[in-house]
Image (cartoon, rainbow, N blue to C red):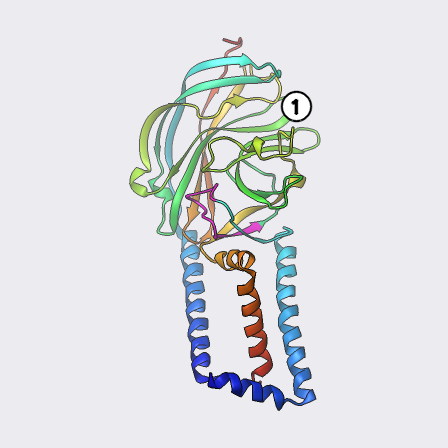
């Protein structure tokens, strides 16, 4: 091998190794970061509650939320994906989890907010088991890194009971 | 260009024993790469432990050319996780986020619905005709780690095959002509 190729080889190998160590280090330091997320989410109104033609129950909700996800950001966080899931149990299914609303937060300054939204996705059951059903709302977040390990977290925020009859 | 003719000279002056040593060392490189890949498959439990993102459907989280590390554990699939799944009749696996989960009480089977963060609607249009849910057997793994940009190497090589041949040729030449 000529001296030039030799030197190039050494240089590239060293640069790649250094970059790999930095990436691993950045991701490893996330282990010492423990987020303290605060959130308050409640159902303001059941806008629509009916049985679809397919026989599945369908619910459209209005949610009121105040969320502070600033602590979910570390220096290795590219964005945080946050969503609110409705979780409940039925006779057929041991666990149902349905995302109602989600948001991509791309920087820390937008991670604290209060808002009222109609749910982005309908709460649709497998079957018609929702009348009078107690449903838990859980806030989940997914910290997506600049490089390295992805971090998932969740906190239960509230629970509510659906009406006994369709609207 | 001096080193090219020098390399050619060195090829001519090779003895058979030297050639054999080079062949063996080349074989060692290839087999150790294979061992690493298969070892990763064992450790992660996923049939393809590393995937390259090919579309922009998960932007801004994942861009084309980013690499994802997959893991397939026994833990049940839950909403919010990013999974890689195969759809019948589609060759290329898809990387999207789970938005709905229904887990049976008796069999513990799961019905899963996915959506790309950057897509407007859910993935039912991407699934096979008439398919409403993904089952466990469609899912190849969940994404646990992320590395940006590195996947461009494979994208470029698949889209411009001549670059791949030049690279393989150059590496082969280097291995053959290197003295120890």
Q: Position of residue B166 (x, y in %)?
A: 54, 69
Q: Which residue sits at x=41%, y=69%?
A: A15
Q: Is residue A30 above or below residue A54?
A: below
User: Which residue appears at 55% of the width and 37% of the height?
Assistant: B78
Figure quadrant of residue A124: top right
Q: Which residue is mark 1?
A: A92
Q: Position of residue A20 (x, y in %)?
A: 45, 63
Quadrant hosting residue A94: top right
The subunit letter for the residue under badge 1 reads A
Can you tell which quarter of the image residue B24 is in?
bottom right
Is residue B62 shown in magenta?
yes
Residue B57 within the segment the image draws in magenta: yes
Mark 1 Cα within 10 Å, few/some/many (few <14, many 20+)? some
The magenta segment is: B56-70
| Main secondary structure of the magenta stretch | loop
The image shows residue B5, relative to residue B137, as above or below, that is below
Instruction: State the image coordinates of residue A166 (x, y, percent, origin top left).
Output: 52, 9
Place of residue A136 in the rendered image (x, y in percent of width and height, measured from the top left)? 49, 25
């Amino acid at each position: 091998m000529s001296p030039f190729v030799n030197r190039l080889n050494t240089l590239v190998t060293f640069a790649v190794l250094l970059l790999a160590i930095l990436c691993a280090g950045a991701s490893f330091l996330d282990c010492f970061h423990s987020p303290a997320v605060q959130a308050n989410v409640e159902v303001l109104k059941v806008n629509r509650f009916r049985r679809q033609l397919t026989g599945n129950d369908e619910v459209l909700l209005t949610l009121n939320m105040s969320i502070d996800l600033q602590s979910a950001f570390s220096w290795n966080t590219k964005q945080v994906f946050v969503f609110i899931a409705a979780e409940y149990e039925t006779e057929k299914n041991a666990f149902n989890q349905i995302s109602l609303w989600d948001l991509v937060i791309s920087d820390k300054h937008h991670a604290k907010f209060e808002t009222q939204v109609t749910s982005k996705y309908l709460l649709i059951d497998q079957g018609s088991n929702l009348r009078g059903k107690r449903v838990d709302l859980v806030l989940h977040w997914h910290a997506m890194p600049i490089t390295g390990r992805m971090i998932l977290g969740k906190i239960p925020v509230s629970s509510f009971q659906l009406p006994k009859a369709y609207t | 260009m001096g080193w090219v003719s020098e390399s050619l000279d060195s090829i001519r002056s090779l003895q058979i024993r030297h050639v054999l040593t080079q062949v063996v060392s080349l074989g060692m490189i290839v087999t150790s790469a294979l061992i690493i890949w298969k070892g990763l498959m064992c450790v992660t439990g996923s049939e393809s432990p590393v995937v390259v993102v090919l579309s922009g459907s998960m932007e801004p989280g994942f861009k084309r050319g980013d690499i994802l590390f997959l893991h397939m554990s026994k833990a049940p699939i839950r909403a919010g996780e990013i999974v890689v799944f195969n759809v019948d009749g589609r060759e290329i696996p898809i990387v999207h986020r789970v938005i709905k989960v229904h887990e049976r009480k008796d069999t513990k089977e799961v019905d899963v619905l996915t959506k790309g963060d950057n897509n407007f609607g859910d993935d039912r249009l991407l699934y096979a005709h008439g398919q409403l849910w993904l089952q466990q057997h469609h899912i190849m793994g969940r994404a646990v780690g992320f590395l940006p940009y590195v996947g461009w190497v494979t994208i470029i090589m698949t889209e411009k095959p001549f670059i791949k041949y030049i690279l393989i040729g150059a590496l082969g030449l280097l291995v053959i002509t290197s003295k120890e």
